Image (cartoon, helix red, strand yellow):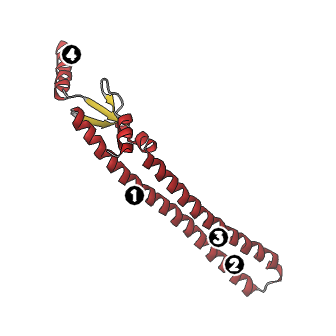
Amino acid sequence: MMIKKILVMAALLSVQTAFAGGLAVVDFGKAMSLVREGAKMQAELEELKADRGERLQEMEKQLMAMQADYQKQEMILSEDTRKKKQAEFMMANQEFQKAVSAAQQEVAQVGERKSMALFERLRTTTESIGKEKGYDMVIEASAVIYVGKADNITAELVTRFDAGE
């Protein structure tokens, strides 16, 4: 039992010695939402979603009108015409579903691309802060369950990033 305690203490001391310059944590998710560029990126994504949503609503409106028109005429249409109208509606519905999927995929891809570009720039600024302050390691806050003594540099990252450093 005593040997176990000694080994644990030795391990802790070696970790502490290995990071003599200190540890810092940064919350990139929070930083991305707080920097001006992050807010601009969110606004652009919302605008893209709204634009695609308007297009989809128009398509849906046309689809509903097509369905209502069919239902009004269904009883007086010949069997061949009824089948043709049903096929047209099915094709229009499939096109609508494809458009919904494509819009969702486009928004996701644009968001991912913009987020990655912003993250890379934030990471570069974080690296500069870490080097200037002499940290041995800067860790993403979401990847850590517990850190005893570590500086949180998120606020400084936001300030410096917005200042253009």
Residue for point 27% across, 38% down: 129
The picture places residue 120, in percent across and down from the top left corner, at 32, 50
Residue for point 28% across, 46% down: 124
The picture places residue 95, in percent across and down from the top left corner, at 58, 73
- Residue type (three-letter) at the residue carrying disc 2: Gln
The residue labelled by disc 3 is 59
| Mark 3 and mark 1 residues within 8 Å of each other at the beta carbon | no
Q: Sort mark 4 into few (<14), some (14-19) or many (20+) by Cα contacts within 10 Å.
A: few
Left or right, residue 48 beside residue 4:
right
The picture places residue 150, in percent across and down from the top left corner, at 30, 27
The nearer-to-camera label among 3 and 1 is 1
Describe the element under mark 4 as helix, strand or loop. Answer: helix
The residue labelled by disc 1 is 113
The quarter in which the N terminus is drawn is top left
Mark-to-mark CA distance, 2 and 4: 77 Å
Left or right, residue 105 beside residue 73:
left
The residue labelled by disc 4 is 5
Residue 122 sits in quarter: top left
Q: Sort mark 3 into few (<14), some (14-19) or many (20+) by Cα contacts within 10 Å.
A: some
Residue 19's disc number: none
- Residue type (three-letter) at the residue carrying disc 3: Met
Residue for point 53% across, 64% down: 103
The nearer-to-camera label among 1 and 4 is 1
Q: Earlier in the sequence, mark 4 or mark 3?
A: 4
